Amino acid sequence: MAKLKIVFLGTPEIACGFLRRLAASGQELAGVVSQPDRPVGRGLKLSRAPVSALAEELGYRTFRPATKQELHAVISELKPDLCVVVAYGRLIPAETLALARYGFLNVHFSLLPKYRGAAPVQWALIKGEKTTGVTLFWLDEGMDTGPVFLRREERVLESDDAVSLFGRLSACGTGLLDEGLRKILAGEIIREPQTGEASAAPKLSSDLALLDFSLPAAELLGKVRGLACGPKPRFSLGQSGRKLAVQVLSAALPEAPSGDGPAGAVLSVEPGGGFIVKCGVGSLLVRTVKPEGKKEMRGSDFLNGLRLKPGDMLR
């Protein structure tokens, strides 16, 4: 059977599983493209992207083009049949897309055209979706607007947060990519225009992570679930003349009514280790938190440490 000459484009950790799958696929992996090394930490030490580091470990040619022109030169030199893109992080110009014989095949973690953009998994959880999935589609000049090749649905579980949902969608996506490669080799290439209502999944801002207890509890729970990979959802609490930032790591909606009070009031401390706080609509069971400068702890231990009790306010 003929082999496809493939170039893989990806940058973060979520793309590494797809690179490993391509490496084991029996196809010809001609090169791996990632974004350039970035300065991180207080010392601003240059850090290699996870995909780039893995590609070097596996022995593949690696490229880190800094400009569109450099990317064009790389793809032009490698002359691939197909480019596979997973979370590369940059729009690719039309003249570069035209260099691959079959085109650029992108793995996107939503059912397009819903949640086009950088953070589809997180926004699906923030918005309370019950179903999401993975779309394998052909890149064009737009932001996730190209024709669809394959797609597969995945149910969103009530217990899901961004970490668990990313894991399942990644497994779903690698299987979908395998199927796509088989179809291309068999000449069964599909390019169907996207249909349905489009929505956006923009980058996540730090301001989005602020938990305002005057909002509905279901909306706050969506943030806790969707921002599990960061930026971590948080509220601020006045303590000893300063504001203490408190990250909320896990939460749920209480199974039974939990009393009433103003938004932000602690309603009860739960036997399982959490506490219930009143919201604008309903209430939120806060299970685990991480106060600024401290380790993760149960919600009840956090309240006890600050000598907070039912009736006290979180603002």
Image: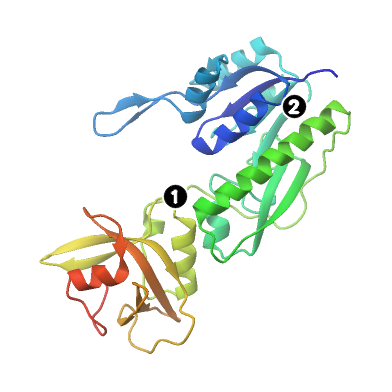
At 49% from the left and 65% from the top, the residue drawn is 222
Residue 171, compared with residue 47, is above or below; it is below
Q: Which residue is mark 1?
A: 229
Residue 253 horizontal/vertical position (percent): 47, 75
The residue at which mark 2 appears reads as 103
Q: Extreme front residue here?
A: 271
User: Of the residues shown, which amino acid type is indicated by label 2?
Assistant: Gly
**Residue found at x 37% / y 70%:** 286
Q: Where the C terminus falls, by quadrant?
A: bottom left
Q: Residue at x 46, y 79 (%)?
A: 254
Residue 140 drawn at (x, y percent): 70, 34
Residue ranking furthest to the top: 77
Alpha-carbon distance for marks 1 and 2?
32 Å
Around disc 2, counting alpha carbons within 10 Å, would you say few (fewer than 14), some (14 to 19), or many (20 or more)? some
Q: Secondary structure at mark 2?
A: strand
Q: Give the x, y percent position of residue 39.
A: 34, 28
Q: Nearer the viewer, residue 174 or 235?
A: 174
- Viewport quadrant of the N terminus: top right
* Residue type at tag 1: Cys
